[in-house]
Image: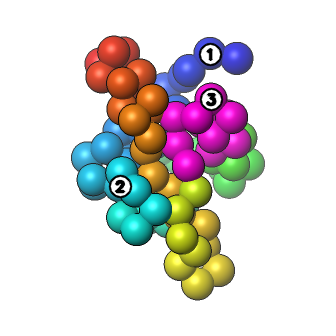
């Protein structure tokens, strides 16, 4: 599977919000709000799994019941390469 528009949007949100470590990670709910692209939860979950498997993002510390994510150095390089 190759990187798609949803992946790029999610990585851009993390990058622009300076979510670059476990402590600065943002929740999936925040990312969905920032996206506002009308994708289903399953689409986001698949995108998060893909980005984690490719090591473009990692999970941060939990925020209550929500998972948080941050962009990795590899993810930042890929994002800047594509943009």
Q: Secondary structure at mark 2?
A: loop
Q: Secondary structure at mark 1?
A: loop
Of the numbered discs in the image, which one, if any, rests on residue 54? 3
Q: Earlier in the sequence, mark 2 or mark 1?
A: 1
User: Does the stretch in magenta take in 34?
Assistant: no
Residue 29 shows in the view? no
Q: Position of residue 1 (x, y in %)?
A: 70, 17
Q: Which residues are magenta?
A: 48-58
Q: Position of residue 28 (x, y in %)?
A: 54, 61
Residue at 58% from the left image edge and 56% from the top image edge: 59
Q: Secondary structure at mark 3?
A: loop
Question: Most extreme residue toward the bottom, as rendered?
Answer: 64
Residue at 26% from the left image edge and 46% from the top image edge: 16
Of the numbered discs in the image, which one, if any, rests on residue 2? 1
Quadrant of residue 62 within the rendered picture: bottom right
* Vertical comparison of 49 with 70: above or below: above
Of the numbered discs in the image, which one, if any, rests on residue 19? 2
Residue 55 shows in the view? yes
């Amino acid at each position: 599977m190759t990187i798609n528009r949803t992946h790029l949007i999610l990585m851009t949100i993390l990058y622009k919000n300076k979510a670059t470590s476990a402590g600065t990670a943002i929740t999936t709910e925040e990312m969905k709000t920032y996206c506002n692209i009308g994708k289903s939860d399953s689409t986001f979950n698949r995108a998060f799994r893909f980005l984690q498997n490719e090591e473009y993002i990692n999970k941060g510390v939990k925020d209550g019941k929500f998972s948080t994510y941050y962009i990795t150095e590899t993810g930042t390089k890929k994002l800047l390469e594509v943009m």
